[in-house]
Amino acid sequence: MFGKQAALAVVYLVIISIFLGASVPFLRAQEQSPSADNTWVFAVSGDSRNCGNVVMPAIAAGVKRDHAAFYWHMGDLRAIYGIDEDYKAEPEHRGKPPDMQAYLQDAWSDFIAHQAAIFEPVPFYVGIGNHELISPKTREEFVTKFQSFLDSPVLHKQRMADDPKDVSVHSYYHWIQGGIDFLYMDNASQDQFDAAQLKWFEGVLARARGNDKVHGVVVGMHEALPWSLALGHSMNDWPLGVKSGEQVYQDLLDFRSKTKKPVYLLASHSHFLYE
């Protein structure tokens, strides 16, 4: 079910068929012509800091070659704590180390120009990671800078359908595509998952439970839930992470048990690739 890997340190997964479309014919993405066995694909990776301007073009090429329905980034866009190696090597710097303050002002614009834009016209969904919150960066700045991604027509329409009063753009979101509810959760800092995000998450699951057009759930996040295979580099690393992560895990178990709809989890923080 998992295929193709790009070079270097970035995780790249092509989901050939999340639910084996040959035996589950409802998995027919309206946005994309399905193959003969009703499968469709999307791509996901994370942690493109330090080498993103090198690796991401290769991933974008693979995404287009394989006709992925969308690309999903799991966070850690640029290093922020220091100047990314690939940024230093860009021709416009003429081999001279760029100024740190100038880098901080340009880092996310550089990501958009050199990493996100090259995926067009493939839809690009962006997630927040812990490097997006290294000082002086903040969650608020991230939401503002990436508003066009976080409030894209697809995500805006979904947010309004869920709650017409929810006019604020968030660092967490979801959308429904091809019969699958895709959720991105923000666990980029040790104050997450907070009560507001948990309430939103449980509301999404409740609606998915009663929606006959939703046949499965895929949850993406930067750090893995507690007690995962990434135990040493996951939400186990802080008390609220354990408590709130266990709640999310239990909610997903209950959802799967009561609905018989499959659930998949994706994370990137540990830099692992499982096939």
Image: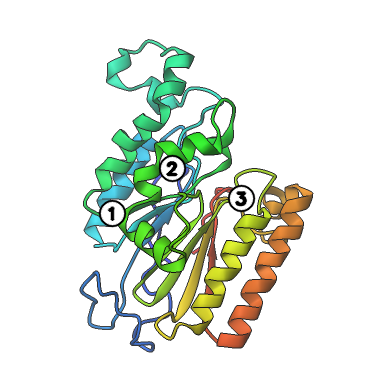
**Above or below: residue 108 compared with residue 154:** above
237 and 207: which is toward the camera: 207
Residue 58: quarter of image: top left
**Sequence order check, earlier mark of 1 and 3:** 1
Q: Of residues 191 and 112, which is closer to you in this image? A: 191
Do the CB atoms of the residues marked 3 and 2 lie less than 8 Å apart?
Answer: no
241 sits to left or right of 183: right
Circle 3 sits on which residue? 187
Q: Earlier in the sequence, mark 3 or mark 2?
A: 2
Label 3: element kind: loop
- Residue identified by numbered label 2: 8
Residue 274 in view in this figure? no
Q: Residue type at mark 3?
A: Asn
Residue 199 can be seen, yes or no: yes
Name the kind of residue labelled 2 in the image.
Answer: Leu
Pointer 1 with pointer 2, Cβ within 8 A:
no
- Which quadrant of the figure contains the N terminus? bottom left
Spatial CA span between label 1 and label 2: 15 Å
Q: Residue tagged by mark 1? A: 62
Q: Nearer the viewer, residue 138 or 20?
A: 138
Label 1 CA crowd tier, 10 Å (few <14, some 14–19, many 20+) = some
Does label 1 or label 2 sit earlier along the sequence? 2
Amino acid on which the number 1 mark rests in the picture: Gly
